[in-house]
Amino acid sequence: MTVETKTAPQDAEGWFREGVAHLDADRPADAKAAFERAVALDPRHAKANNNLGTLLQWDGCRDEAEACYRREIGRAHV
């Protein structure tokens, strides 16, 4: 957990940023967990859905990835 997610654990954007940091550090499993948390907090978070979908697709979870992409397409904000 980063300072941001510790101080604001209900902030989807913070979890999204943590996921990106994990991707940058080549920790895809940690990134996936952070993106899952972001999407759980805000199911319409487009970037979190996109990144989570990509990681799921890499893992061969096509149906779950498609669900993320569909949520992204129907997003309310980015």
Image: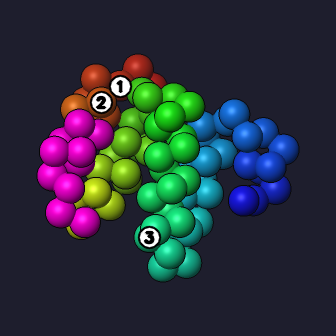
Q: Circles 2 and 1: CB distance less than 8 Å?
A: yes
**Disc 3: which residue:** 28
Label 3 to label 2, Cα distance in Å? 21 Å
Q: Position of residue 3 (x, y in %)?
A: 82, 56
**Circle 1: is it few (<14), some (14-19), or many (20+) Cα within 10 Å?**
some
Q: Main secondary structure of the magenta part?
A: helix
Label 2 to label 1, Cα distance in Å? 6 Å
Q: Which residues are magenta?
A: 59-68
Q: Position of residue 35 (x, y in %)?
A: 48, 50
Judge from the rendering whether residue 68 lies leftward or rightward of residue 12; answer left or right.
left
**Circle 2: is it few (<14), some (14-19), or many (20+) Cα within 10 Å?**
some
Per the image, label 1 sits on a secondary structure element best described as: loop
Q: The disc labelled 3 sits on which kind of residue?
A: Pro
**Circle 3: is it few (<14), some (14-19), or many (20+) Cα within 10 Å?**
some
The disc at residue 52 is: none
The disc at residue 75 is: 1
Q: Residue at x 50, y 34 (%)?
A: 40
Q: Earlier in the sequence, mark 3 or mark 2?
A: 3
Q: Residue at x 20, y 56 (%)?
A: 61
Is residue 78 visible from the viewing direction of this image?
no
**Disc 2: which residue:** 71
On the rendered image, what quadrant is the C terminus found in?
top left
Please tell me whether residue 62 belongs to the stretch shown in magenta: yes
Is residue 64 visible from the viewing direction of this image?
yes
Judge from the rendering whether residue 40 lies leftward or rightward of residue 3; answer left or right.
left
Q: Circles 1 and 3: CB distance less than 8 Å?
A: no
Q: The disc labelled 2 sits on which kind of residue?
A: Arg
Q: The disc labelled 1 sits on which kind of residue?
A: Arg
Q: Nearer the viewer, residue 63 or 2?
A: 63
Q: Nearer the viewer, mark 1 or mark 3?
A: 3
Q: Position of residue 18 (x, y in %)?
A: 61, 57
Q: Residue at x 80, y 49 (%)?
A: 6
